[in-house]
Amino acid sequence: METLEICGIEIEIERKKIKNLHMYIHPPYGNVTVSAPLKMSDETITKFVASKIDWIEKHQSKFQKQKSRVCHYLNGEEINIWGKRFTLTIIHSETKSFIVSGNDALLLIDENSTFEQREMIVNNWYKEQLEPVMLEIAEKWEEIMGVKASSYVIRNMRTRWGSCNTSTKKICINLQLAKKSPELLEYVVIHELCHLLEGSHNEVFKSYMDMYLPNWRSLRKRLNEKAIGTF
Ligand SMILES: [Zn+2]
């Protein structure tokens, strides 16, 4: 992919058969990509992007703030569960466990525990929460869609919300979805089940999504929130 440095920001340029210029700012790092019409010159792109520098910086700083909200498992921090925010209270204890009640989330852990140890306890809890809800959603939609996955696995993934191996029919769901609203989990499960009907993200796939979950585009947008500008 071609890149241009504009006002000190490295910008990835993708040429497409389109009429307008689209600019995207991606979380969590705020990197910028531009989709530009095939014949648009570098000079025109540079001028355009330079004129939108305020817009870019505004969204980059927004993502920067969101990034610092990543949980460190410290006392008083906010922690997300099923799309709601809870306040984390650390209780020093020999017992290791994570308890959620009311608006509080209590992490029982020994004083010298590391970030990784705290994260593991909370992630195990997330997995326990996610599994029955995911299986219930999956069962409901397998029946509606007339498909069947061979197995469901929950994994902590960095780059994707789910995956579906179309030959083994194994579906993998990201543990991080336990932090989001359950309707977003449902969207991901339906997306992966649609791959049992159509392997790629083509028009056939989209027509299945439209049929089973007409508002899937807005759910996808909520899940992968990025700033988009069309100019
Ligand atoms: Zn897919």
Image: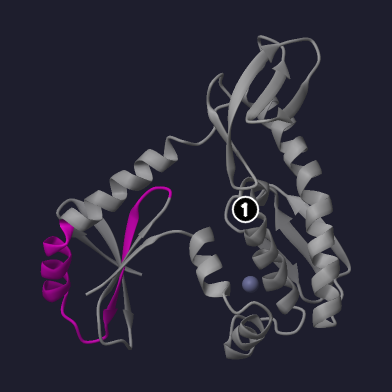
Kind of residue sitting beneath label 1: Ser
Q: Residue at x 58, y 73 (%)?
A: 216
> Residue 214: percent from the left, percent from the top?
60, 79
- Is 91 left, or right, of 217 in this rendering? right
Number of marks in the rendered image: 1
Tell me if residue 106 comes above or below residue 167 in the rendering.
above
- Is 223 left, or right, of 150 in this rendering? left
Q: Secondary structure at mark 1?
A: loop
> Residue 32: percent from the left, percent from the top?
31, 59
Q: In terms of image quadrants, where is residue 172?
A: bottom right
Q: Quadrant of ligand 1?
A: bottom right
Q: Residue at x 71, y 78 (%)?
A: 194
Residue nearest the observer in this picture, 198 or 181: 181
Is residue 14 one of those drawn in magenta? no
Tell me if residue 19 comes above or below residue 101 in the rendering.
below
The residue carrying pointer 1 sits among few (fewer than 14), some (14 to 19) or many (20 or more) residues within 10 Å by Cα, namely: some
Is residue 33 one of those drawn in magenta? yes
User: Which stretch did the figure color magenta?
Assistant: 28-53
Quadrant occupied by the C terminus: bottom left
> Residue 152: percent from the left, percent from the top?
83, 60
Q: Which residue is mark 1?
A: 181
Residue nearest the observer in this picture, 50 or 193: 193
> Residue 66: percent from the left, percent from the top?
42, 42
